Amino acid sequence: MKTDLLHFFYGLWNNAPLMASFLTILITQALKIPAHYLRYQEWDLHKCLDAGGMPSSHAAGVMALVASLLYVVGPQSPVFATAVVFAAIVMYDAGGIRRHAGEHAVLLNRIAMEIYQSDVDFQDSPGVSQEGERLKEILGHEPLEVLAGAVIGAILGIAIGKYW
């Protein structure tokens, strides 16, 4: 049992595409802290846990997977093709749909705040409270954040895929 578990973890450790993706996600999440400082002149260590922001760890992780698979299985592999399609969907989602959901959250939070600050009485409305939880506004990425993440992911994916 113990040797099976060791073989399992050894197999994970030697899986270059998996390690490329995980390490790249960790690195890009850590890069969000100095990127936030450069833009706002304040240190915020919580940025390494946030979705959204510069660079996109979504884009970086999937591009690292694609780039490392290029070296491990080659461009003709169905696994590589699957990863390319997966990366395109993830980056489109991170930079498009999720960003728009964040913009909607900003608008809904603003509307909720205006209603809360008005004299509207919601006591007779079932299931509606005057003050509720704010929606998370930063869900997605700007196109430049996705591009930066993709470039970082490609570079790290190539390096890890080639040398891991």
Image (cartoon, rainbow, N blue to C red):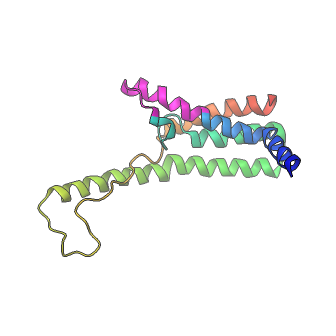
Query: Would residue 74 be seen by someone viewing this image from the given angle?
Result: no
Closer to the camera in the image, 140 or 28: 28
Q: Name the chief secondary structure element in magenta.
A: helix
Left or right, 106 with respect to 154, comes to left
User: In the image, is 76 to the left or to the right of 148?
Assistant: right
Whether residue 163 can be seen here: yes
Say which quarter of the image contains residue 31.
Answer: top right
Q: Residue at x 72, y 48 (%)?
A: 83
The residue lying at 80 percent from left, 41 percent from top is 15
Residue 161 percent location from the top left of the image: 78, 34
Q: Residue at x 11, y 62 (%)?
A: 119
Question: Residue at the front extreme?
Answer: 2
Q: Position of residue 36 (x, y in %)?
A: 43, 29
**In the picture shown, does residue 128 fall above or below 88?**
below
Q: Please provide percent x and percent y for residue 39.
A: 40, 27
Q: Which residues are magenta?
A: 27-45
